[in-house]
Amino acid sequence: MTLANAAIGTARFGWTSGGSPIGPLYPFLDGYQAWAGGCTDADPTYTGYTGGSRGSALTVNPGATTTGTVTLIGQPVKVVKGTTAQSGLQVQAVHTGPGTCPAGNETLTFSQTTAAGTGLVTIALPYGDWRLEVPGKSPSGSWPSVSIRPSTPTPAVKQVTIN
């Protein structure tokens, strides 16, 4: 999670899918813009992106709690071994994009697992370039990559083939 304010620039915080408290924050009158992800290319206004916006600033009042939402893009993933759909497997996404990651490279591991019969799971990703992996498994060939952009809000299913 990244917050931006003209007075402080950007600040990055850890986050979870259920929401994470951040703070305390100084109650700047112009508030904070927020977006998911800690790497510079997670910013919806990153150089080279089209159609991206940070959205309205969140106003922070002294001694009060402010809530807000950030955009994540649902990336459908199908895990197969040969041609057989695999169920009960976790998927992780490793940042591979051109943006820098001040806290170190981001690896996102998702708790939901692939569905029985279909091998499908949808993971929520910040903007950027990501390599999709299945922890504890090896790929058939190489791990596939996806590019999540503001201009492509509905990505196609990406297949991950494991040995």
Image (cartoon, rainbow, N blue to C red):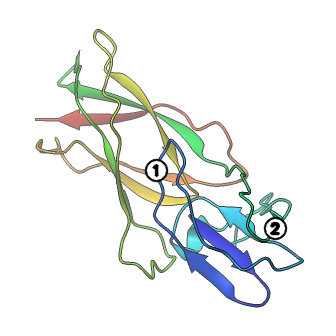
Instruction: Name the residue at the top extreme.
Output: 117
Task: Estimate the spatial distance between the alpha carbons at disc 1 and disc 2, rounded to whole Å.
Answer: 24 Å
The x and y percentages for residue 53 are 80, 61
Secondary structure of the residue carrying tag 2 is: loop
In the image shown, does 114 or 25 lie closer to the viewer?
A: 25
Residue 24 % position (x, y)? 61, 73
Q: Is residue 162 left or right of residue 76?
A: left
User: Which residue lies at the image location 55% right of the left edge and 58% below the top edge?
Assistant: 21
Residue, far front: 63
Neighbourhood count class around disc 2 (C-alpha, 10 Å): few under 14, some 14–19, many 20 upward: some
Give neighbour class at mark 1: few <14, some 14-19, many 20+ (Cα, 10 Å). few
The disc label shown at residue 16, or none: 1
- Which amino acid lies under the numbered mark 2 shown in the image of this protein? Asn
Q: Is residue 39 above or below residue 102?
A: above
Quadrant in which the C terminus appears: top left
Could you say where residue 107 lies in the image, as x and y percent from the top left? 34, 59
Q: Quadrant of residue 137?
A: top left
Q: Which residue is mark 2?
A: 61
Q: Nearer the viewer, residue 27 or 64?
A: 64
> What residue sits 77% from the left and 62% below the top?
50
Mark toward the start of the polypeptide (1 vs 2): 1
Closer to viewer: mark 1 or mark 2: 2
Marker disc for residue 100: none
In the image, residue 154 sits, relative to residue 49, either above or below, namely above
> In the rendered image, is residue 90 in sight?
yes
Residue 44 appears in the rendering: no
Based on the displayed image, in which of its 4 quarters is residue 103 positioned? bottom left
